[in-house]
Image (cartoon, rainbow, N blue to C red):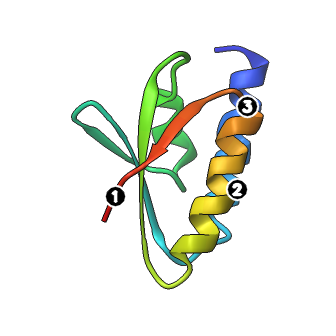
């Protein structure tokens, strides 16, 4: 894993940890708690399309912040509906 990927993982986990909402990343049939750096290390691989599930009291703010962080690191993410 490259240093850039490591920076992305740390940035994503730190950003997610600022929110009370449940934030889960889906890749195919895997679901990973975005607040878990270890979970991200085992799942976050380049050039994949991820789906982000956010539920909780501050979900709108969390969705916005995480969408920006994924984009900043060149990772494609789609917000799950509902």
Left or right of 17: which side holds 28?
A: left
Q: Secondary structure at mark 3?
A: loop
Which numbered circle lies on residue 49? none
Near mark 3 (Cα within 10 A), the count class, few <14, some 14-19 or many ≥20, is some
Instruction: Pick whichever, 14 or 46, lies toward us.
Output: 46
- Disc with the residue nearer the chain's start (1 vs 3): 3
Q: Where is residue 8, by image quadrant?
A: top right
- Where does the image place residue 65, in percent across and percent down from the top left? 69, 59
Comparing marks 2 and 1, which lies closer to the viewer?
1
Q: Secondary structure at mark 1?
A: loop
Residue 15 against residue 1 in the figure, above or below = below
Find disc 1 in the rendering and name its residue.
Answer: 81
- Looking at the image, which residue is at 63% across and 53% down? 66
- Looking at the image, which residue is at 77% across and 22% down? 4
Q: Which residue reaches farthest front?
A: 81
Q: Which quarter of the rendered picture does the N terminus lie within?
A: top right
- Where does the image place residue 46, in percent across and percent down from the top left? 55, 17
- Looking at the image, which residue is at 37% across and 53% down? 80
- Disc with the residue nearer the chain's start (2 vs 1): 2
Left or right of 16: which side holds 49?
A: left
Whole-angstrom CA distance, mark 3 to mark 2, is 14 Å
- How many marks overall? 3
Find disc 3 in the rendering and name its residue.
Answer: 73
Whole-angstrom CA distance, mark 2 to mark 1, is 24 Å
- Where does the image place residue 6, in percent across and percent down from the top left? 71, 28
Left or right of 14: which side holds 41?
A: left
- Disc with the residue nearer the chain's start (3 vs 2): 2
Which numbered circle lies on residue 14? 2
């Amino acid at each position: 894993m490259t240093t850039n990927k490591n920076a992305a993982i740390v940035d994503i986990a730190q950003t997610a940890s600022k929110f009370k909402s449940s934030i889960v990343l889906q890749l195919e049939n895997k679901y990973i708690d975005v607040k878990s750096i270890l979970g991200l290390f085992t799942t976050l691989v380049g050039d994949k399309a991820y789906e982000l599930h956010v539920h909780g009291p501050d979900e709108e703010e969390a969705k916005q912040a995480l969408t920006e962080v994924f984009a900043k690191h060149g990772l494609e993410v789609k917000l799950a509906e509902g």
